[in-house]
Each structure stands twice: as structure tokens, then as C-alpha cells.
Amino acid sequence: MKHEAQPQSMVEPSRHDPVRAPFSTIDEVLVELREGRMVIICDDEDRENEGDLCIAAQFVTSTALNFMLREAAGYLFVSLTNDDCDRLDLHWQCPENTSVNGTPLTVTIDGHPKHGFTTGVSVSERTRTIKMAIDPTSTPSDFVRPGHINPLRSRDGGVLVRNGHTEAMIDLCRLAGLYPAAVGIEICKPDGEMARVADLTVFAAKHGLKMCTIADLVAHLQSAG
């Protein structure tokens, strides 16, 4: 089904160039995002050395979110621009960020009960919260905090300023001509430890997903001027 993550048997096979395996080109990844499909974004081995499963926020569904939580099993988040975070009054989660890579976490949110939300933790309510967060007409009063959705505030300038997954997702959505917001989750191995490139290659092949690197995205943007 278009614009919806599917179980393994319903996902089209990956079409990686064997010369570049296991990574696809940025242009190939953009095609996937435009079609509402998930992709995997990998950072450098000397940074987090992790891969995040990502879908453009405008295409997220309960089915897609459930797939991400079940199959990737990491920390679910939504990457937002500074403008969206300002619109929703999403201030930093703590006054001083001392995390190793400066993970840009803001306060967490749920949709407000006035919109029919209950606890906010179900997949359907988390999906609705994400959809409301990227609605340009929504305001801080449409949400309660703390909640079960973890927004990350992307740096202006994207990966050319900070080479993180948060910025990469926003940059890829922009390049794809989509709303600049994405839902992401770190991919873990079945034993709960973090998946590395070899593990991510297996994960991508199993689910028919394309995979790219932040380094390739940086090069793509630099070459485009």
C-alpha cells in the first residue's frame, strides 16, 4: 500500500547497485521517501555508528509506526524544524545539553484530551499527535506535556552544520519536496544491542529498504552548491 509501511512480504525488493552495496544513492533514497516508504540513514562509525529507520512524517500511519516500534525497537522520535518547534513552544528538555552528540531533545508531547486523546501512548494516538505536530495550524494549546512523542529540534543549516540523524531526515524530506519533518527510530538487533552496518544490511534486505549515509548526503548537498 502506498504511503504505508508494510510487513516484509508486502515490501518491494530492494534494488541496490551492487557496486555501492549496501548503500543506495541519495537520489534513490529520495524516490523512496516521495513514495511514502521508509529508508535507513547511517551515520559515521566514529560518531554514533547507528542506523535510523525513517519515514516522512506526512506519510506516517498507525501501521507504519507499529512496524517501526516492533521491528526497529529503538527510541522513537520526530524530527522537526526550528520553526515548527517555535510554533509549538517546544523548549529544550533540559537547560544544559551534556549528551555526547548533543541530541536535540525537546519536551515531550501528547495530543490534548479536547481532541479526543486519552493516555496518548497507543500507536493510533501517537500517530495522531505526530500529524497534529506537523499541522501548520496547530498551536501549543493543542497538546499536553509531558507526553509520549519525543520531538527533536533540527539545527538550521542541516547536516552541513550538524551531521546528525535529526538534520539528515529534515534535509532528505526537503530534497524530496516533502514537508520538512520525519519520524525516526534507532534500529536494534534482536538481542537489544545497537545494529551496526552489517546488521543494518541484513535488516534492509529483509524488509526491502534502501539505506544511505549521512556522509553521502553531505557530499550531495555540497555538490549541489
Image: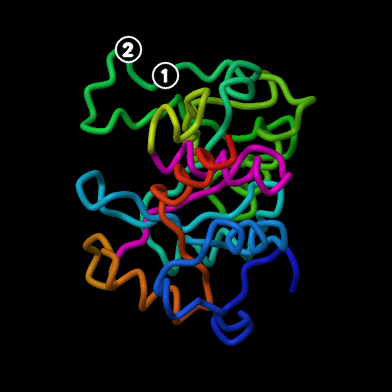
Q: Which residue is mark 1?
A: 92
Say what secondary structure mark 2 lies in.
Answer: loop
Name the kind of residue labelled 1 in the image.
Answer: Trp
Spot occupied by residue 123 in the image (x, y as percentages of width and height)? 58, 55
Q: Residue at x 64, y 63 (%)?
A: 32
Quarter of the picture holding the N terminus: bottom right
Badge 1 crowding class, 10 Å Cα cut-off, few under 14, some 14 to 19, many 20 or more, is some
Quarter of the picture holding the C terminus: top right
Q: Which residue is mark 2?
A: 95
Q: Which residues are magenta?
A: 164-188
Give the side of residue 52 with respect to residue 11, left or right.
left
Whether residue 120 is in magenta: the answer is no
Spot occupied by residue 186 in the image (x, y as percentages of width and height)? 37, 54
Give the side of residue 168 with respect to residue 6, left or right.
left
Name the kind of residue labelled 2 in the image.
Answer: Pro
Say what secondary structure mark 1 lies in.
Answer: loop
Residue 120 vs residue 103, the one in the foreground: 103
Residue 152 vs residue 167, the one in the foreground: 167
Report if the CB atoms under discs 1 and 2 are less than 8 Å apart. Answer: yes
Query: For the residues marked 1 and 2, what is the alpha-carbon distance in whole angstroms?
Result: 7 Å
Q: Residue at x 49, y 29 (%)?
A: 154
Q: Quadrant of residue 175?
A: top right
Q: Which mark is residue 124?
A: none
